[in-house]
Image (spheres, rainbow, N blue to C red):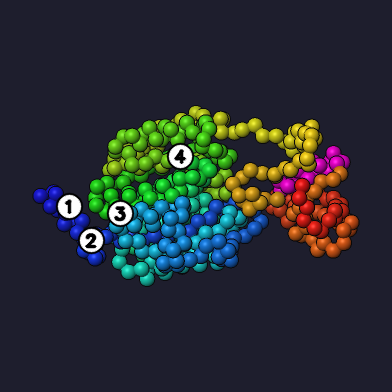
Amino acid sequence: NKTFTSFLKQIKVFTSKKGGITMRILIGGIAHETNTFSNVKTTVESFKQWEWIHGDTIIQKHRKVRNYLGGMIDRAEEIGVEIIPSFSAFAMPSGLITKETYERLIYELTDSIKAAGEFEAVCLALHGAGVAEDADDLEGGILSAVREIIGYKIPVVVTLDLHGNITDQMVKEADVLLGVNFYPHVDCYERGKEAIDITKQILLEEIHPKMSLKKLPLMIPTSTTNLPPAKHINELCWTREKNEKIIDCTFFHGFPYTNIPEVGVTVVAITNNDQELADQTAEEIAIEIWNTREDFFPDIDTPEEGLNKALRMEGKPTVREPDSIDVHKTTWVDDTNAHIYDTLLKRDLDGNLVPGLAEKYEVSDDGKVWTIVLNKTAKFQFQTTTKAKVFTSKKVNL
């Protein structure tokens, strides 16, 4: 009968270990948030500065850590699932990933998968906004390379950043795409655990995921999710998830600082074997996002307006931060700084301290005057020239 047949299928995906029952799930990850407008190329060394690890080192480094891989590892150990670690790489947000680095990343992951032995499923921690010199869709390329090795019978579950630009290729190559719901990203760990739970359900044939991707012709700035309108959209997604047929519904904000065709806001809805419901759910959420699109754009001071506010303040010196985009001074470009410094110069204001300049010049004598071209190599080519005197070559606490 049907129950007995299902039981026989379950036996095929289990191995016996120390008298218990264990599933074998391969885990790994490659994550980078790419700003294609940045001049800072992303290389192998960029990844090795943060994470470039193989095998058991992944478990040792991420166990009990509140990130995607940490959630996968901890949940697997909680429910008796055997984890097979492969390769994990992470680099801080920066510019295009070089062609050589992209090829090396693919090689390291696929080579570790080939050497992993037998496993029944794959869970990968990716990002969603990775771009290489010759590959607009880093994650789609990664998943395609994995599929070339494992085929399409082994399920692949992927965790993604809320700022991912979700593509048709990602949906084609993965069984499940799970994005974090919050910004700041406080739920990576929970999504990692959920990835393992969903993978287990797939292997037990308790669920048969059907995904729907809805793209909007819309780019929005980075938006916090603890306030409307993003909070409202999340709540709509969670309301849909109360339907037992809906496995997940995620609003991906996209990453607008990637100059690629598939940049933008998307919705991914996943159901248990109901494609029509998945399509309908994604469409409904997308319509609500579109109807509230104007609410995603905040009122932001121009450099002139910000300077006027600063000049009206009393007390200690004013500290200004040039941008508020995810990771300062890595995700964004120096063009922002040049515009702000140019505003200061036009007002003929003296006494502006620029700590970063000390890193670009060999400071030898206090009082020395430099002629400086700000933003000399930026893609946007907005430049401003000024003279700066070395106030002190020592660290100063303001």
Give the residue type at disc 2: Gly
- Per the model, the C-alpha gap separating discs 3 and 1 is 20 Å
Position of residue 265 in the picture relative to residue 351 (left or right): left
Please tell me whether residue 318 is drawn above or below residue 78 in the rendered image. Answer: above
Stretch of the chain drawn in magenta: 335-349
Residue plotted at (74% across, 43% down)? 319
- Distance of mark 2 from mark 1, alpha carbons? 19 Å
Q: Considering only order in the chain, which callout, 1 or 4, is on the residue closer to the N terminus?
A: 1
Amino acid carrying label 3: it is Ile
At x 73% / y 47%, what residue is drawn?
337
In this view, the residue in front, 185 or 338, is 185
Q: Residue type at mark 4?
A: Phe
From this viewpoint, is residue 151 visible?
no
Please tell me in which quadrant of the rendered image residue 57 appears.
bottom left
Is tag 4's residue or tag 3's residue first in the polypeptide sequence? 3
- Mark 1 is surrounded, within 10 Å at the Cα level, by few (under 14), some (14 to 19) or many (20 or more) other residues, namely few
Q: Position of residue 329 (x, y in %)?
A: 66, 51
Look at the image and say whether residue 342 sits in the magenta stretch. yes
Residue 352 image offset from top left, x and y in percent: 82, 46
Left or right of 253 on screen, residue 363? right
Q: Earlier in the sequence, mark 2 or mark 3?
A: 2
Q: Say which element carries label 2.
A: strand
Left or right: 330 in relation to 206? right
Distance from the alpha carbon under mark 4 to that under mark 3:
29 Å
**Which labelled disc corresponds to residue 251?**
4
